[in-house]
Image (cartoon, rainbow, N blue to C red):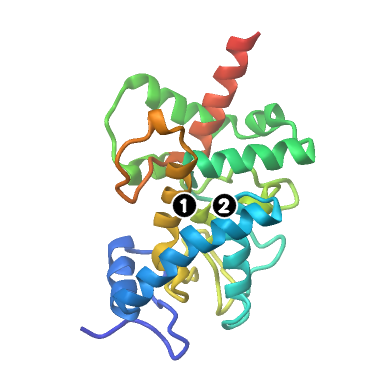
Amino acid sequence: MELKSDANGIFIEGMKDSLELASYLQRKFKEEDIQSTYTSLTEEHINIARSEGITPLRKFWQRLNQTYKNIPPLRCERGCAHCCHTGVAATQVEWDGILSNIIAHGTDLNKVIERSQRTINRVRETLRSNKKIEQVDWHRLVINQPCPFLDEDHACIIYEDRPLDCRLVVAFRDQCRSKKLEHAQRGVVIEEAVGATVIAKIQHDQTPKFKRRKFKGVQPLKLLQHWLILWQDKNKKKK
């Protein structure tokens, strides 16, 4: 089966089919190389992170940032926010990193919630209905709406700690001219093949032992709007 990539090994179909992307990554990289990268990012990097006094997740973000410098130059730049008008999901450990960023920068989450009330209300209403819907349907609730953390200047206010969902949507060719992500490219580096599993392992290892379940390589995802709802409800209870 022919790989849908260009001369630089970039997945040329964008984000239209996540299963097709997963298949592409499995064919592009050798299994032993994938396993070696995963081991490095979940063992060696965790020890390095501890010695540097940062979280394992932040260390993984640094690795991704450095890796992307060794491939064709990104066309993404501050203020280019076409791909920021879609559903963004995050794991618990990613959300914890976002909250740490918010505290460090003194961001007012209440203002973030107020600015994103439209999509937050959609998610809240769906949660109250107790409907069992797929992940793709959650994303459809907020499609074509700005991310809660996109400011008035079209810049990300949590950029250093943005989740994997954001980091793997990048443009190497012409700048995006729509919000449909046709120009978003993936499947460039091996870290993308193991990224979600690495984050799941980091979260698993940080979970207290008495709460841990057998590691299965995945962790639950929630839209950023959902995490904001949980934060808001938790703070209301404190009052």
Name the amino acid type tagged 2: Leu
Q: Residues within 10 Å of mark 1 (few under 14, many from 20)?
A: many
Q: In which quarter of the image is the N terminus?
A: bottom left
The residue carrying mark 1 is: 199
The CA span between labels 2 and 1 is: 7 Å
- Count every numbered label the image shows and give the total: 2
**Residue 57 seen in the current view:** yes
What residue is rendered at 39% in x and 55% in y? 197
What residue is rendered at 27% in x and 31% in y? 132
> In the image shown, does 110 or 102 lie closer to the viewer?
102
The residue carrying mark 2 is: 57
Give the farthest residue toward the left.
1
> In the image shown, does 167 or 12 lie closer to the viewer?
167
> In the image shown, does 114 or 134 lie closer to the viewer?
134
Name the amino acid type tagged 1: Ile
Classify 178 as above or below 214. below
Where residue 211 sits in the image (x, y, percent)? Answer: 39, 29
Q: Helix, strand, or loop for circle 2? A: helix
Q: Quadrant of the C terminus?
A: top right
Classify 210 as above or below 51. above
Classify 236 as above or below 153. above
Q: Is residue 111 left or right of residue 197?
A: right
Give the farthest residue toward the right.
106
What residue is rendered at 31% in x and 66% in y? 22
Q: In this view, does 83 lie to the left or right of 14?
A: right
**Residue 148 seen in the current view:** no
Give the farthest residue toward the bottom.
7
Where residue 155 sits in the image (x, y, percent)? Answer: 71, 53
Q: Is residue 216 left or right of residue 203?
A: left
